[in-house]
Image: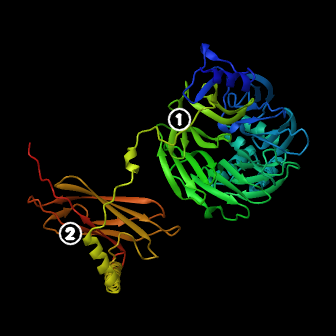
């Protein structure tokens, strides 16, 4: 380790970091300042933040520890490597952020912890305020059932039957009703109903993600609003002083990741990744989130935004980059499944990148689409946070799957070249080609095109119109003869697909029919075949089709035998008819393979 690296540790962290295993380990860009494999920290990226909670310039590490998932959830504050403060959290935390809620001096930030339907706000490392999400409207039928139980008009058996019917119909029930349906013993159901039937029925949602947004000024210590996503498919923006809901934005699905930019009083953008595999961009005055929608091929694992580009990690081991308008710029295939991702914003060097943790115990850093650095760890990384810790700006916090904690510091002389470390096309591919000079033939051809430009254009237009005319004629002919595999009749919206299996002389023919209507079933349909009887023999050439429910795929199978051993084949037409009509609804043409013939052993 160089003298400069030693001074960086001693001066910038005030001697708070431990040097494990007799020395400092790291690659050529990172110093491993602290490593504790048995720190017993079980957390995620959303539950880690760095903040100057005491306004003394010494930034602390705040971690919401998930504990066992049911017990021992705590909010832990680290000063250097020492546990400075610890607070018990009642429910499982889903997010931790640091924000300024007032303009009082000294400028001390508050810590907001999202847990269940509540946001716990801590000021000066002490509980300050608890915000509860607005209650949702209870289904009137469900409320009436519990009122009848309270008035003893119905028993628990009727209550259970009615609640199970409502749940089967897709009705969103309250937590009380869901808990009641989980009980199997009759005595437990009786006790539960008697205990809670006099309590007012409430439907409470829970927080799924949490972020912040500057309210009116863009300074680092400006007042910020809290932005939170809920299980009820809504985004709430909270006032930081009165803790009232400033605005509510509805989404088509449950939000899981947030990226917020802009000012609430001026203009802002909220990029939201949802459980339906889509990304929505919400702006001031947005009424329809589907206008700015990005559909992903897989479920999102992480979402970050750098300037005007959106970085998304998905479960199909890919990292995608989109513009703010939804246009895909590039996709990088990762060597493993992503576990989490975070943004590196090193302002002193103007360096911005995306850091991605993988399940192969590696952490990759991408500058745009280029892999610029790889960090290897002892276990899978579950939480990442880059920022100022202590008095050092370039600190990377990593929590491991087994509960370990690793702290790395970016070297001051570290540089990241925009050159991909992974295998790819050679650099010569980007070299400009030595284009030869224009030949006499090229010049003569150019002169001819200039002199006959009008004639050439008219000829091109005539040929183009003829092509369009012939195409439309053939299309109209296919519609008249019902030769399309997709029905053009709006009263019978059907889709036909046929498959042939086997090498001969016996083949298996499978006809797939699908009703593409939204709500209208199809009935009284028949399937028949047109074929050369000298060449083929069908075991069943006439099939009666039952009622086709919209959206489902129905498969109909039959066997046919090739009667010729001369290696010839022919086309077979499949007709879907309506009972009582001679014109087919749709027609499919099957090009039969050549029969291999009988093999005598």
- Give the secondary structure at mark 1: strand
Residue 39 in the image, given as x and y percentages of width and height? 67, 22
Q: Secondary structure at mark 2?
A: loop
Residue for point 73% across, 20% down? 15
Q: Residues within 10 Å of mark 2 (few under 14, many from 20)?
A: some
Residue 45: quarter of image: top right
> Could one spot residue 387 in this view of the protein?
yes
Q: Which mark is residue 531?
A: 2
Horizontal relation, residue 85 to residue 317: left or right: right
Residue where numbered disc 1 is placed: 373
- Left or right of residue 265, residue 338 in this image: left
* Residue drawn at point x = 58 percent, y = 31 percent: 381
How far separated are the C-alphas under marks 1 and 2?
A: 64 Å
| For residue 98, above or below residue 66 | below
* CB under 8 Å between discs 1 and 2: no
Q: Position of residue 523 (x, y in %)?
A: 43, 70
- The colour scheme applied to this rendered structure is rainbow
Q: Residue furthest top?
A: 22
Using the image as rendered, state which of residue 476 and residue 242 is in the foreground.
242
């Amino acid at each position: 380790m160089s003298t400069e690296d030693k001074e960086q540790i001693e001066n910038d962290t005030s001697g708070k970091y431990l040097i494990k295993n007799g020395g400092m380990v790291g690659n050529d860009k990172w110093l491993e300042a602290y490593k504790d494999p048995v720190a017993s920290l079980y957390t995620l990226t959303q539950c880690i933040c760095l903040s100057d909670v005491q306004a003394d310039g010494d930034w602390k590490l705040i971690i919401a520890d998930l504990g066992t998932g049911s017990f021992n959830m705590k909010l832990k504050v680290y000063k250097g490597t020492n546990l400075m403060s610890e607070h018990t959290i009642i429910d499982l935390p889903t997010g931790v952020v640091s924000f300024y809620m007032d303009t009082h001096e000294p400028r001390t930030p508050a810590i907001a912890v999202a847990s269940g339907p509540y946001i716990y706000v801590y000021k000066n490392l002490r509980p300050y305020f608890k915000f509860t999400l607005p209650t949702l409207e209870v289904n009137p039928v469900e409320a009436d059932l519990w009122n009848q139980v309270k008035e003893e008009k119905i028993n628990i058996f009727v209550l259970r039957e009615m609640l199970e019917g409502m749940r089967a119909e897709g009705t969103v029930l309250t937590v009380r009703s869901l808990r009641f349906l989980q009980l199997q013993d009759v005595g437990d159901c009786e006790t539960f109903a008697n205990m809670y039937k006099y309590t007012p029925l409430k439907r409470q949602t829970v927080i799924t993600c949490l972020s912040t947004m500057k309210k009116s000024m863009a300074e680092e210590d400006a007042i910020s609003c809290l932005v939170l996503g809920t299980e009820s498919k809504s985004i709430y923006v909270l006032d930081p002083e009165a803790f009232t809901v400033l605005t509510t934005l509805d989404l088509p699905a449950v939000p899981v990741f947030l990226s917020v930019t802009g000012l609430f009083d001026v203009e802002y953008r909220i990029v939201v990744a949802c459980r339906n595999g889509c990304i929505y961009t919400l702006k001031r005055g947005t009424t329809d989130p589907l206008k700015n929608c990005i559909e992903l091929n897989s479920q999102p694992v992480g979402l970050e935004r750098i300037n005007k580009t959106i970085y998304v990690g998905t479960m199909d081991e890919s990292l995608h980059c989109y513009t703010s308008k939804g246009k895909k710029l590039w996709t990088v295939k990762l060597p493993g499944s992503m576990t989490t991702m975070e943004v590196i914003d090193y302002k002193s060097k103007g360096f911005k990148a995306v850091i991605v943790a993988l399940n192969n115990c590696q952490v990759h850093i991408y500058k745009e689409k280029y892999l610029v650095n790889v960090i290897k760890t002892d276990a899978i990384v579950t939480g990442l946070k880059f920022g100022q810790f202590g008095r050092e700006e370039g600190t990377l916090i990593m929590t491991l799957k087994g509960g370990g904690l690793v702290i790395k510091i970016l070297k001051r002389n570290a540089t990241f070249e925009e050159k991909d470390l992974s295998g790819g096309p050679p650099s010569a591919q980007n070299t400009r080609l030595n284009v030869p000079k224009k030949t006499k033939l090229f010049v003569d051809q150019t002169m001819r095109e200039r002199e006959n430009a009008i004639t050439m254009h008219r000829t091109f237009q005539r040929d183009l119109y003829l092509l369009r005319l012939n195409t439309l004629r053939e299309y109209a002919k296919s519609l008249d003869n019902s030769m399309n595999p997709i029905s053009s009749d709006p009263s019978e919206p059907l889709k036909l697909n046929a498959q042939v299996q086997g090498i001969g002389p016996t083949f298996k023919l499978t006809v797939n029919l699908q009703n593409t209507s939204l709500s209208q079933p199809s009935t009284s349909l028949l399937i028949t075949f047109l074929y050369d009887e000298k060449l083929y023999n069908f075991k069943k050439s006439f099939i009666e089709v039952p009622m086709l429910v919209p959206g489902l795929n129905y498969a109909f199978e039959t066997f046919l035998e090739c009667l010729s051993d001369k290696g010839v084949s022919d086309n077979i037409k499949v007709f879907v008819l309506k009972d009582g009509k001679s014109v087919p609804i749709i027609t499919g043409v099957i090009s039969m393979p050549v029969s291999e013939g009988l093999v005598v052993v």
